[in-house]
Image: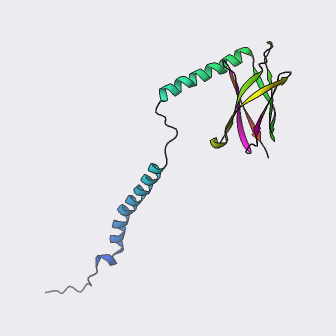
Amino acid sequence: MKSNTEPVTRWQQEPLAWLVFAIPLGTIAACALLYAIASSNSDSLVVDDYYKRGLQINKVLDREARAAERGLAIGIDTLRDGILEFSLSAGAADYQPESLAVRLSHATRSQVDQTLTARHAGDGRYVAAPGALAPGPWYVDVSSDDWRLVTRHHVNN
């Protein structure tokens, strides 16, 4: 009869046993972390009334098309130091309303967006006072009831 001379090792001392347990435990830990991240951050891109939002987008596109039909264009002269100055060119028509709605939207920081009114200063020039603006790219959205123009301008401080 042969005697078994191999030493008996416990499972805690076997590296292969730890590898077998580590893979599922790591997967469970990663899933728990991803679940915590997903449940704490809302998905702001999804809206409940997506159909209504889609209809609003079509209205906005219609307003931009009407601005193009009229030959309207804006040129930003100044957007700094709390002053917004821009010119509105109306192509062949003489179109200069007394006031225009202006929305200033920062490209990356929605908490600093502003809505204001620009007053006509003569010769197709308009002036508004948005206050201090954060540096970076800004979208200037100028509109009336039936048309809309958007341009991008970079603010340096």
Residue closest to the far right: 123
Its colouring scheme is rainbow
- Looking at the image, the residue that sits furthest to the top is 93
x%, y% of residue 72? 75, 19
Q: Residue at x 32, y 71 (%)?
A: 17
Q: Residue at x 73, y 15 (%)?
A: 70
The residue nearer to you, when weighing 27 against 157, is: 157
The quadrant holding residue 88 is: top right
Image point (77%, 41%), residue name: 155
Asked which quadrant contains residue 118, the reply is: top right
* Residue 4 location (% of width, % of height): 20, 85
Left or right position of 3 against 140: left
Q: Residue at x 40, y 62 (%)?
A: 26
Is residue 130 rendered magenta in the image?
Answer: yes
Q: Residue furthest left?
A: 1
Does 126 appear in magenta? no
Q: Position of residue 52 (x, y in %)?
A: 50, 25
What is the number of callouts on the image? Answer: 0
The part of the chain drawn in magenta is 129-147
Provide residue 111's location: percent of width, then percent of height: 63, 43
Task: Name the residue nearer the viewer: 112 or 136.
Answer: 112
For the N terminus, give its image quadrant: bottom left
Left or right: 80 with respect to 66?
Answer: right
Above or below, comparing residue 29 to residue 139 in the picture: below
| Residue 7, quarter of the rendered image | bottom left
